[in-house]
Amino acid sequence: MSDTDEEKIWVLQSRDGHPEAFESLIRAHQRMIHSLTFRMTGSLADAEDLAQETFIRAYRRLDSYQGTAKFSSWLYRIAVNTCLNWRQRELRRDQIHTQWTESNAVSQSEPDTNKPAGEVQAALMKLPAKQRAAIVLTVYDGHNHAEAAKILGCSETTVSWRVFAARRKLKRLLNAQGGRNE
Amino acid sequence: MNDSDLDKKLKAAPVPARDEDYWESFPRLVSAKLRLTPARRPMVERHWLPRLAWGGGIAFACLVIGFALGHWHGQKQKNDPYALLQNGKMLREVQTLFPNRVRAIVQDEHGVQLVLADQPDVPVSTPIYVRICDGKQCSSLVTFSGQELEIAGQKVTVLADAQGGVIVAGNRFAWSSDRQTGASDGLKIEAKSLNSTTL
């Protein structure tokens, strides 16, 4: 039985009210969703909140899942939209961004032993949320621009522009950080 | 730096690792939240036409029963919109899912939140229902004696005494269920022990 077949069964069972089936779906996708939400927020705590919110929304919308697309793609779209819509968390993101900029270090609750990783995440956090989503989708998760456009609900041209603008800004930011470290 | 160099640099930044316990408990945490939050997911109706007649009949019966029950309990429902928190079955289910880790179940304008301890060190005791209003918003919760929580922007400690009384202590106030007074800062507090007869 392929993963996809197994997933279809879990989806059907979840619709019929079997929580253990939905937990299986969560187990299968939780790492992917947490990676996305962390890249989008830069905070482990916010990433956890958004991952929870994603799965809760997904459960409530299971009836709208047609089964024509991969479940992971459908779930991913919910996660991206959840990240983009979570305004309150965005305010906290800005605070984290400010802390990073000022102290050039991550918060005490989330010690970062990997400085280059912290710099990359800090640079990502300086992008507008939609540009950041475009980079996460295309660079980290390997979606092409057409797939990213479907997930983000915009045109392929818009995605291409966002990726272009994000790359330009990231290069500038990371070059500047590299210069400071030398 | 060209695009390829940038991609390499971006991909070299890993997402912070979480331990296996986290991944093991996360699906259960989501499940618990789904149980705590009222279901809004519509049921799939695969064969709706044959069921329409039954549905109509049942709906009419429900309407009659609902009207009768509503007439009886309407006032009680109005006074107690947070009945979910005082649902003993729900509380026991959550405690079974997270033994000795449930610090509180909080219900406020944002919905229902589960507050869990990092370690399974929350002692078993009689649950306590607390409702705090600060003039703008209200928060209700079920917790256990000795728990320190942040409610309505205030850090409070909830305590139960041997007689079943409840004390809610904050930085600048202490409220007791015996006297029903003592709150300050514009707070309105209501609290009671949820013993087996209440639940």
Image (spheres, helix red, strand yellow):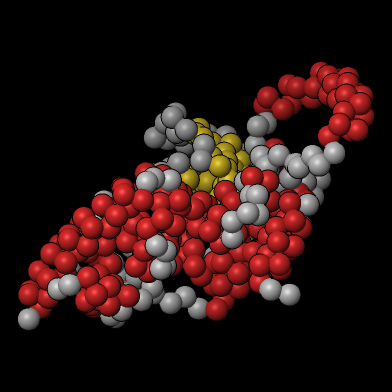
Q: Residue at x 66, y 67 (%)?
A: A4
Looking at the image, residue B19 sits to the left or right of residue A12; the answer is left
Q: Residue at x 61, y 69 (%)?
A: A27
Q: Residue at x 88, y 24 (%)?
A: B56
Q: Tell me if I can see residue B41 in this picture.
A: yes
Q: Tell me if residue A179 comes above or below residue A148 in the rendering.
A: below
Which picture quadrant has residue B99?
bottom right
Measured as percent of width and height from the top left, residue B30 is found at 61, 58
- Name the image quarter holding the N terminus of chain A: bottom right
Which picture quadrant has residue B80?
top right
Looking at the image, residue B14 sits to the left or right of residue B148; the answer is left
Q: Tell me if I can see residue A60 in this picture.
A: no
Which picture quadrant has residue A101?
bottom left
Measured as percent of width and height from the top left, residue B168 is found at 53, 46
Measured as percent of width and height from the top left, residue B166 is found at 61, 46
Q: Tell me if residue A36 comes above or below residue A67 in the rendering.
A: below
Residue closer to the observer: B83 or B113: B113
Q: Tell me if residue B39 comes above or below residue A25 in the rendering.
A: above
- Name the image quarter holding the C terminus of chain A: bottom left
Q: Tell me if residue B96 comes above or below residue A63 in the rendering.
A: below
